Image (cartoon, coloured by chain):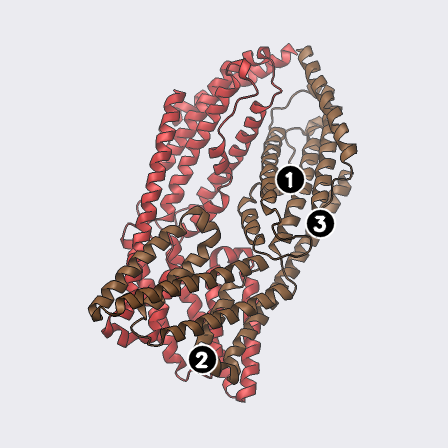
Chain colours: A brown, B red
């Protein structure tokens, strides 16, 4: 049975790697298409005459905003839009206020407002909650505010310029959305969903491996090496999980994921799985230690432990599969009483051990 | 003794928070100063006449490149420079190759080169080793290549334009370096150094707390709550440690950190500390479990365990301090034999336990 699990794991990881490779190639092609589309603003004369040099901003938007996941592209694009509008608006206000104060006065007023606005916005960028979700938007705000406020004196047709830039940013964003959402969209939500359910499988394998190693032939005791890389990958998944959930919140309705889908639940499950992973890691350290209990101490608990290990594995896999397929665990009725029984049994054997003492 | 440790920890965390707040304010002011300095390119007539509209690129460079840590600012700035030069060069080549093929030919050749270059570079961005270190540089490469290749037909004086842009990006970078390195520099290396040594202290506190809880009055058993937040923060520090080490590598000689300082050693230490943290976490889970061994089983190991716990704590603190102050552990000679002795004793008491069985 263990060999079957092992083979299925190897097959799964090969499949996973090939899938990832294919996804990366698709993403690269999508970026290429988006770049060519946005370059047409420059390359086709009739459009260029409408847009002018501002077409540059469309290219910049595509390069900077386009991300692997649809949610990331959407959130960056929207934040860029909001940041540009807010920064541009405030910059116009600063430039208009400074206009009447003469040449030196203008320099002083604009300089002061640039300093204050830049410093305050930079401080905001470092507040963890803003940094996590709106960092990019605040950066664009600082950039636009600065560009608009400073060029107040230079560009007479500042409103016209602002309108044109906003329009080209919009065009760039439209190209991003078009290619990102319509051609093989990569949803951060899907990724989070698959990652979470595959973690159950990974941990189940680790538990079974530990169990196997502990009760294996005693001459090899203390030299067992258990493969814990998958366990460690679960343990260190916090930051990637959080960014995936963050992107997933921006994604529109797709597949089985509606609006207001409870993405934070995935983070809670991941937190619990990380705790389990840390327990497995120290279990592995115990098993690999040269100091091992005698076989006489192991014998009375062997059967119960193996039972617990096996049903833990089965339960974990079942949980992972039920999350993956979004259905209630089918063996719920079968598994729970069994675990209850095992719990009772294990308490009994522990008190038996105590009695031996 | 525990109370003193507790108070020193509270004091330490308050001090730490105030320091962090002060650092953030200093960083905000530095960004403000950098923005004002770079705005002078626009605001002062004599300079603006030299630079022209390209001054925009200087402002953009400051906003995008300026980061909290000096190393991050340096690496982003240099990557931006290299990306711009490479992208600009290749873009020029593409534009020149396409020039002779007439209007439609130009569009086709440039469109194809934009597609190929964009797709290949985007694929490179997703390779983990490149993503970790050079992501920003590759993005700038794509952007510059695209802008230069596409505007080949439009801008007759493309070399002049490229020279001007590169010059203004250089000016923006100079302003960044000037304010980032000369006014209260924040070194990523210092931060990594302090974080690593403070982790030892955190884990020592957790170990002592666990020891205390396990041997405390038996009536409260199973309801002990141990504060493991600091332990978890150590456990989840992988990604932040890695990015700090990445930035630290770019930083010039400062304080006690020379060139070729072995920053990867910090990552190795952090990895070991994370393993210890995961062991402590599962220790805590064991202590908080309602199923506890009888006091008769605890008594024979109580003294030895407390000794181990205390000397572990002392050793951890000593190690942390010796890393912090960059000196050899002064009590090395005193601690090691003691631990050896305790190890002997613990093996003895375990075999005693076995004898009881």
Tags 1 and 3 both on a single chain: yes
Residue at 33% x, 51% y: name it: B27
Whether residue B290 is situated above or below residue B109 in the rendered picture: above
Q: Going by the image, does A15 lie left or right of A240?
A: right
Q: Earlier in the sequence, mark 3 or mark 2?
A: 3
Q: Earlier in the sequence, mark 2 or mark 1?
A: 2
Label 1 Cα crowd, 10 Å radius (few <14 / some 14-19 / many 20+): few
Please provide percent x and percent y for residue A243: 54, 50
For the N terminus of chain B, give its image quadrant.
top left
Please provide percent x and percent y for residue B189: 38, 47
Tags 2 and 1 both on a single chain: yes
Q: Looking at this view, is B299 or B249 the one in front?
A: B299
Label 2 Cα crowd, 10 Å radius (few <14 / some 14-19 / many 20+): some
Q: Looking at this view, is A258 or B282 the one in front?
A: A258
Q: On what subunit does the disc labeled 2 rest?
A: A
Observer-side mark, 2 or 1, equals 2
In this figure, which residue is indicated by the disc labeled 1?
Answer: A227
Q: On what subunit does the disc labeled 3 rest?
A: A
| Secondary structure state at the residue bearing disc 3 | helix
Q: Earlier in the sequence, mark 1 or mark 3?
A: 3
In this figure, which residue is indicated by the disc labeled 3?
Answer: A12
Please provide percent x and percent y for residue A155: 33, 75
Whether residue B84 is situated above or below residue B336 in the rendered picture: below
Residue at 40% x, 29% y: name it: B317
Whether residue A190 is situated above or below residue A56 in the rendered picture: above
In this figure, which residue is indicated by the disc labeled 2?
Answer: A52
Q: Is residue B270 visible?
A: yes
| Secondary structure state at the residue bearing disc 1 | loop
Whether residue B95 is situated above or below residue A125 in the rendered picture: below
Please provide percent x and percent y for residue B343: 51, 21
Q: CA distance from mark 3 to mark 2?
A: 52 Å
């Amino acid at each position: 049975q263990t060999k079957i699990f092992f083979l299925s794991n190897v097959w799964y990881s090969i499949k996973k790697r090939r899938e990832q490779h294919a996804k990366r190639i698709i993403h690269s092609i999508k970026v290429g298409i988006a770049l060519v589309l946005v370059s047409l603003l420059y390359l086709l004369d009739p459009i260029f005459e409408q847009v002018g040099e501002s077409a540059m901003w469309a290219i910049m938007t595509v390069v900077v905003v386009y991300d692997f996941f649809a949610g990331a592209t959407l959130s960056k694009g929207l934040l860029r839009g909001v940041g540009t509008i807010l920064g541009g608006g405030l910059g116009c206000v600063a430039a208009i206020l400074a206009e009447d104060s003469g040449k030196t006065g203008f320099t002083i007023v604009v300089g002061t407002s640039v300093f204050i606005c830049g410093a305050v916005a930079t401080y905001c960028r470092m507040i963890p909650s803003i940094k996590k979700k709106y960092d990019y938007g605040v950066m664009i705000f600082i950039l636009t505010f600065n560009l608009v406020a400073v060029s107040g004196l230079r560009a007479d047709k500042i409103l016209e310029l602002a309108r044109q830039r906003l329009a080209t940013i919009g065009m760039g964003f439209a190209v991003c959305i078009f290619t990102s959402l319509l051609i093989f969209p990569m949803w951060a939500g899907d990724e989070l969903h698959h990652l979470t359910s595959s973690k159950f499988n990974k941990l189940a394998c680790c538990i079974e491996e530990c169990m196997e190693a502990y009760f294996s032939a005693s001459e090899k005791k203390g030299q067992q090496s258990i493969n814990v890389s998958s366990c460690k990958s679960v343990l260190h998944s916090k930051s990637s999980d959080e960014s995936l959930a963050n992107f997933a919140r921006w994604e529109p309705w797709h597949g089985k994921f509606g609006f207001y889908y409870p993405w934070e639940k995935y983070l809670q499950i991941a937190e619990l799985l990380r705790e389990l992973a840390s327990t497995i890691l120290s279990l592995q350290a115990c098993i690999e230690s040269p100091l091992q209990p005698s076989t006489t101490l192991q014998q009375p608990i062997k059967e119960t432990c193996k039972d617990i290990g096996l049903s833990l594995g089965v339960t974990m896999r079942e949980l992972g599969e039920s999350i993956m397929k979004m259905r209630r665990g089918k063996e719920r009725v079968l598994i729970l009483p069994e675990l209850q029984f095992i719990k009772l049994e294990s308490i009994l054997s522990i008190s038996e051990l105590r009695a031996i003492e």
